[in-house]
Amino acid sequence: MGDAIDLSGDGGVLKEIVRRAKPDAISPSDDLPVVDVHYEGILAEDAKVFDTTREDNLLFSFELGTGSVIRSWDIALKTMKVGEVAKITCKPEYAYGRAGSPPDIPPDATLIFEVELVACRPRKGASVGSVSEERARLEDLKKQREIAAAAKEDDKKKREEAKAAAAARIQAKLDAKKGQGKGKGKGKAK
């Protein structure tokens, strides 16, 4: 359907859209990090299918950004929308690397996945609203801490200024006493 998009900037993760999502489809986000996908994994070297969810029609679910899947999936799925099908080509350094994943994936294998993003949703126990509310609460807490830190810094500055002013007054009194002491008794002796 389209040309391959270099998602990694070095040719390590290429994405080609096979079927576009509807324009108003949602994408994974911080509020919706858990994704459900159908996929088929193919070895680029010999076009052998090494894994698929299509045969048993089960979805594969995972949370983006947690390291639970190969790097190329974290990169590519963030760019997809629900309903989109994409062909993702993954160089070894973005897949299983030198080690491979025996017995199905040999070392230094380039992999091709056809991935359909079926859904994206909040973490278990969180709703979109609660995630947004928690983020807002944490942001508010951060602002309160910044205000408290600024007030503490102002108080510290005022204390230092007050100490300096007190020290200057004491020094002025000492200087004044020294000045008075120098004039006493000098004119009486002849």
Image (cartoon, grey):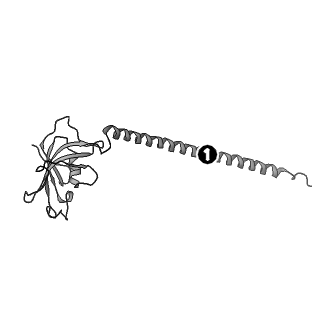
Would residue 51 appear left or right of 170 to someone viewing this image? left
Q: Secondary structure at mark 1?
A: helix
Labels in figure, total: 1
Q: Hey, which quadrant is residue 24 in on the image? A: top left
Q: Hey, which quadrant is residue 136 in on the image? A: top left
Is residue 168 or residue 85 the one in the foreground?
A: 85
Specify the quadrant that holds the C terminus: bottom right
Residue 131: x percent and y percent?
Answer: 34, 41
- Taking the spot 81% from the left edge, 49% from the top edge, the residue there is 180
Is residue 43 or residue 89 the one in the foreground?
A: 43
Classed neighbour count for the residue bearing mark 1: other residues with Cα under 10 Å, few (<14), some (14–19), many (≥20): few
Type of residue at label 1?
Arg
Badge 1 is on which residue? Answer: 159
Specify the quadrant that holds the N terminus: top left
Would residue 29 appear left or right of 110 to someone viewing this image? right
Residue 125: x percent and y percent?
Answer: 32, 44
Residue 177 visible somewhere in the drawing? yes
- Taking the spot 41% from the left edge, 40% from the top edge, the residue there is 137
Residue 181: x percent and y percent?
Answer: 81, 51
